[in-house]
Amino acid sequence: MCGIVAYIGNKNCKNILINGLKRLEYRGYDSAGIGILVDRNITDITDITGITSTTDITGDNTLKEDISNKQVINKQVIKIVKQAGKIKELENLLESHNIEGNIGIGHTRWATHGEPNQINAHPHMDCTGKIAVVHNGIIENYAQLKEELIKKGHKFVSDTDTEVLPHLLEEFLKNETNGQLLVAMQKLLKKIKGSGAIVVLSLEHPGELVAGRIASPLIVGVGRNENFFASDMPAVLEHTRNFIVINDYETVRITKDSVEVYNLEGILVKREPFKVNWTLESAEKAGYEDFMLKEMFEQPYGIRETLRGRLTNGTFHFEEINLTENQIKDLRKIQIIACGTSYHAALTGKLIIEKWAKIPVEVDISSEYRYRDPIVDSDCLFIAITQSGETIDTLAAIREAKGKGAKVMAVTNVVGSTIARESSSVVYTHAGPEIGVCATKTFTAQIVVMYMIGLYLAKVRGTISDAEFARILEELEVIPNKIQFILNNANKIKKIADETYKYTCFLFLGRIYGFPMALEGALKLKEISYIHAEGYAAGEMKHGPIALTDSRTVVVGVIPQDFVYEKMLSNLQEVKARNAKIFSIITEGDKNTKKYSDYIFEVPKTREELYGILTVVPMQLYAYYIAKNLGRNVDQPRNLAKSVTVE
């Protein structure tokens, strides 16, 4: 949530900042703004209201032009333009401002402290108007800091926690740093508590931008005669493919020709840029109406890429798990933590690992994990699943587990993310950039990784026969083709959505491998259509939820032909007797379930453990088409953010 982009170079940066912010819209936001260091020519002292000296005009004591002779004074100022609402509103406002310069900062804000209005939008400035700051994250001790600053004469105009940052920098520059902005940033990181990616533009340091990071993503884009700060690579991918990832408590100074990274103590850190293989086109819609639709249709490719190099022609390589055979054989427990959609992948992982590898698995919601004082020891493998690799709750859980001696493995889609760097081993999903806020292709890639982890552990522990192992690998290799078959029949899902989108209560039912998918189907519908939906283990219907079922209810049943098929069929008949509309996702050729269903969609046959990844795809499509019928913005659902970096 929130997005940062900043530029220093030789180009006019207004459009660079605006276009960068547009490519960060997927993170979620409710206001936006930019700040640019601009030159303004002034030929008459009467043009400058309330200013009495060249120092006040320029912030530069060395300026010698004589105002009384009306010589042209090149006045540098930080021009800030910001607006509540979407970036389009900011663009409309910019049409009335002549704002040009080659160093600037931009921000999209998702409100945490203070309502989403123009005053609370970023950038924020200090009392002198010489320091502008954009910030992602939360300053937990801002109230105390604000009170201290007010006592020193500082005046605040917003309700945000961020506004304390430029005022603190002003104090440090005035009193403790000999005017060095980088040193002031290092002092700032030691002073604040919480999280933040912070970028600073200073009138008195016109040749540089300075930034710092605590637990909130920040990267440097390295160009030729230009450099960038950003929250995420798509913001500046059209300008460079070379990036440096900034770690916690590091500070950075960029000029148009250099990048300097320092640790918290001010010692220079040598870090070479790495090159990404994404193109700008891969982050665009490629002819699809929405990013979400594009990304759902990219799932066969994303799964193949996640399998590539790990599973080829029946040969399986998965050494990146980074555990010895003895360590795997000695495992007594696995803990998996995740949030949101990733939590549903974790539930699937539990089922798979326990069935194939015979290891007990606990699954926790990340935000709850550390507060229950979990029991962890050296015989425990801790797996964190996170699309972005920056989810603050998951990061906190990782640190809790590491502190108690667990081996930590991350499953993430983002190379170089914080959680990837802080884990003992990383298994990357290779789904490619996912711009839509709701996870689709990254979710199915996560499920594939869970399958591979379960298989690898089972193989090493000897809990699966060679023949069974080979059969599962064979079926896993053709899963992308079966998902493509489902996508090729998306119009069938659309027709069902067209007939049911006006219903206001949806229940998603599944058992065993279908249960996490029922949860995910309900979550997707809630996220993008704003319709109340619930996912349940089908056997729990009679313990309460069945009271909700009537002629205004749609029940979506995940009912492939697996070992609980007959029980699931009985559960559907229970809700059918209460006049609910039944939409069943079934195995191709299943004629029995059709008798109890108003609508059906057939998925290809597979092993019962793998049905989950097939049945979730039609539910993704179903949620999408219902939301489109209701006129929703499926790529940027209200109140949601792609990367959740605050608790």
Image (cartoon, rainbow, N blue to C red):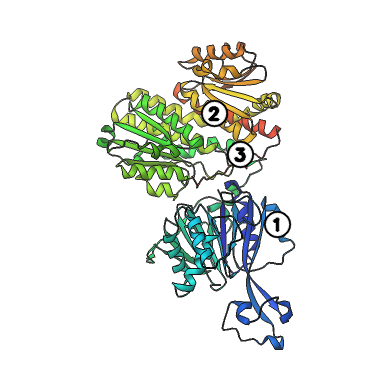
In the rendered view, would you say 311 is above or below 204? above
In the rendered view, would you say 331 is above or below 635? above
Spatial separation of the CA atoms under disc 2 and disc 3: 15 Å
For label 1, the SS is helix
User: Looking at the picture, how far across and down is residue 366, in whole percent?
Assistant: 44, 38
At label 3, which amino acid type do we have?
A: Met
User: Looking at the picture, how far across and down is residue 74, in whole percent?
Assistant: 65, 79
Residue 616 numbered mark, or none:
2
At label 2, which amino acid type do we have?
A: Val
At label 1, which amino acid type do we have?
A: Glu
Q: Can residue 27 be seen in this view?
A: yes
- Disc 1 designates what residue? 91
Q: Earlier in the sequence, mark 1 or mark 2?
A: 1
Judge the density around disc 1: few (<14), some (14-19), many (≥20) Cα neighbours within 10 Å: some
- Disc 3 designates what residue? 292
Residue 180 numbered mark, or none:
none
97 lies left or right of 365: right
Q: Which mark is in front, 1 or 2?
A: 1
Q: Nearer the viewer, residue 343 or 180?
A: 180
Spatial separation of the CA atoms under disc 3 and disc 1: 25 Å
